[in-house]
Amino acid sequence: MEAMRGVSTDTVAVGAAPGLSGMESAARRAVGVTPTQPRGVALGGEDFARLCRWIVPRVESALNGVVLTRSPEHLQLLADKTVAICRQAGLNLDSDTWAALLEHLQAELVGYGPIEPLLEDDTITEVMVNGPNDVYIERGGKIVRADVRFRDDEHVIRIIQRIVAPLGRRIDRHHPMVDARLPDGSRVNAIIPPCAIDGPSITIRKFGKKKFTAEDLIRFGSVTPEMIEFLKACVNSRLNIVVSGGTGSGKTTLLNVLSSFIPNDERIVTIEDSAELRLHQTHVVRLESVPGEEDGTGRVTIRDLVRNALRMRPDRIVVGECRGGEALDMLQAMNTGHDGSLTTVHANSPRDAIARLETLVLMAGMDLPVRAIRQQIASAVDLIVQQARLRDGSRKVVQITEVQGMEGDTVIMQDVFVFHELGIGEDGKVIGVMRGTGIRPKFTPKLEAAGHKLGPEIFQAEYRYGTPAESSAAPKGSGNGHGSGNGNGRH
């Protein structure tokens, strides 16, 4: 009992408290206590941490190798084993300490350990574990250090294995890197020693419980109503659209919103490395790549899935991200009757997106001349939507650019909407102007043929962000402000 020094060891008492979880109630029933029993000892700080370190391995041992899930039966089993161990040790814990202990055990043995509360916090968008002692979060676009830690490297690796095991994936010294997802669709990347020098690393890009809509993006100031109206017309008119942007810029969120504009009567095939897209349509086939076995067999790549999707009679193909030779197959699909396809690429501008696609096509192993590749791109891609994460952490569509064709060896492009960053306001928010260029795209007849007649005001609207004084100077009748709620006006 050396490890239990400082913990009271009288009689077991599991108090009753309002709002007890199912597992806590099960434990109370197992002990057979009533709310009138004496209140036990409250533990906090290092005493509670010492209790947790003492009891976790004992509960694990008592489970005899049972892999717990969040089912009521397994939570009941966990409560029963915990109660038995507490009674054997003669622990007398008050209801709050008991509730905290059960919550800790559930996180350790069923959930994701110390980062479980971070994953449940809707204000946190990203969780980054840099070894057992360094955990960071992103909240409101800013990265800050979290006040949680793991016990050691093995503790981190055990949580990683709990994440990847249900997906049939593995991580060990021979396979030290893995991509996975949580049940809610949140994207996970993990890497362990020997590749991770300072200890196992986990990066989790969280998916919010609420799926963002076009109205949400307008409210956040990521886009303007005119841009949404234009993009909706483009999707409905079956234009091929590439969403471009850097890491964490919001490409997948925007792709989800664009996909929501696809009519419900069309057959959609989505292809991803880790399934993240959440479409509301009913006729959707979701495909996901599969990593190879240890001997290299069984691997299914994005390129394999794109080729297979062409034989699945898709009305639309949505590729979560083009990052390899699948770009060639995607371009060929766009050029051979599969209009209305959507995908994303990593690039910092629409012009860079074209260069990125060229590079990806060359990765397919085909010895094609650069001019031929550019002709494929210019013929296949109609529109590039550039997403960016600004210095204040906000995410905005900063360019919508039409791909007009080829002139000589150059791909000709024309901006339709552009965001101009002007500086940083006193509140730390980016000051800028989102405006249409006033130029109608060359594919306007295609939009009109699909029933979308966009007036000239769509391409001339101007919105200001982060400058209350400027937004108040908007002429009367110019419309309501839209954006992130920090003084946005339409001019």
Image (cartoon, rainbow, N blue to C red):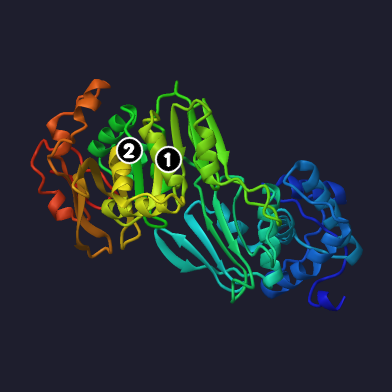
Secondary structure category for the residue under label 1: helix
Q: Which amino acid lies under the numbered mark 1 shown in the image of this protein?
A: Met
Which structural element holds mark 2?
helix
State the image quarter where residue 11 is shown: bottom right
To which residue does mark 1 refer? Answer: 330
Q: CA distance from mark 2 to mark 1?
A: 9 Å
227 left or right, relative to 121: left
Q: Is residue 42 above or below residue 351?
A: below
Relative to 292, residue 134 above or below: below
Q: Where's residue 415, x and y in %? A: 19, 45
The numbered disc on residue 399 is: none
Dot 2 surroundings within 10 Å: few (below 14), some, or many (20 or more)? many
Residue 379 vs residue 351, the one in the foreground = 379
Which disc number belongs to residue 380? Answer: 2
Choose between 257 and 246: the one closer to the eye: 246
Pinpoint residue 387: horizontal percent, then vertical percent: 32, 50
Q: Amino acid at mark 2?
A: Ala
Q: Nearer the viewer, residue 417 or 472?
A: 417
